[in-house]
Amino acid sequence: MDGHRCPFEKAILSTQFVCDKAVHRYVGERTGVACESASARQDCVTLLRLLREGSRFALRVTDTARALPFGMEMKIVFGGLAALQALLRRTEGSMADTIYGMVQEAKQYYGSLEQIPCQEMVRYIAVSRPGRRGPRG
């Protein structure tokens, strides 16, 4: 299952975000989330990498390529998705309500994932409080 594991698995399992490409997998008592599309998963991996790189200063870390503490990783995941949601809601005609939908809409609107204004997203990551219901910004 790890080969197709969703990079936003914890956000989906928390039920705060949904994805139409997510497939729940059960191994013993463990619940995981895999991605049914290799290209969708690659886009999400790219977005998460960009969020990690962009948030180095806000999280006071120098190397985001290594494993980060759980709390920091959750700030990046939840804050990054909340930021993407907020950015897209400002665009005219935004219809995205799933992780995959947001990623695809961002690619279309900004031209590529690399063109998303990460500095705006980092503000959400810095104030993110994963696991809490309600506004995160």
Image (spheres, grey):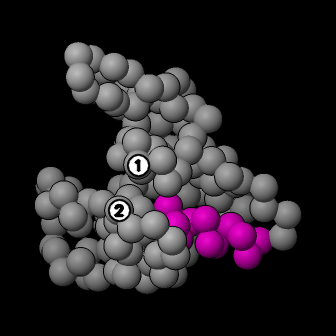
Question: From which residue to which does the magenta span run?
Answer: 80-91
Q: Residues within 10 Å of mark 1 (few under 14, many from 20)?
A: few
Q: Residue at x 32, y 28 (%)?
A: 31
Q: Residues within 10 Å of mark 2 (few under 14, many from 20)?
A: few
Residue 121 visible here:
no
Residue for badge 2: 131
Main SS category, magenta section: helix
Q: Residue at x 47, y 36 (%)?
A: 41
Q: Is residue 82 magenta?
A: yes
- Pick the quarter of the image with the N terminus: top left
x then y, percent, for residue 98: 62, 47
x then y, percent, for residue 33: 40, 31
Which amino acid lies under the numbered mark 1 shown in the image of this protein? Answer: Ser
Residue for badge 1: 14
x then y, percent, for residue 3: 31, 24
x then y, percent, for residue 121: 48, 75
- Residues at badges 2 and 1 in contact (C-beta under 8 Å)? yes
Residue 56 visible here:
yes
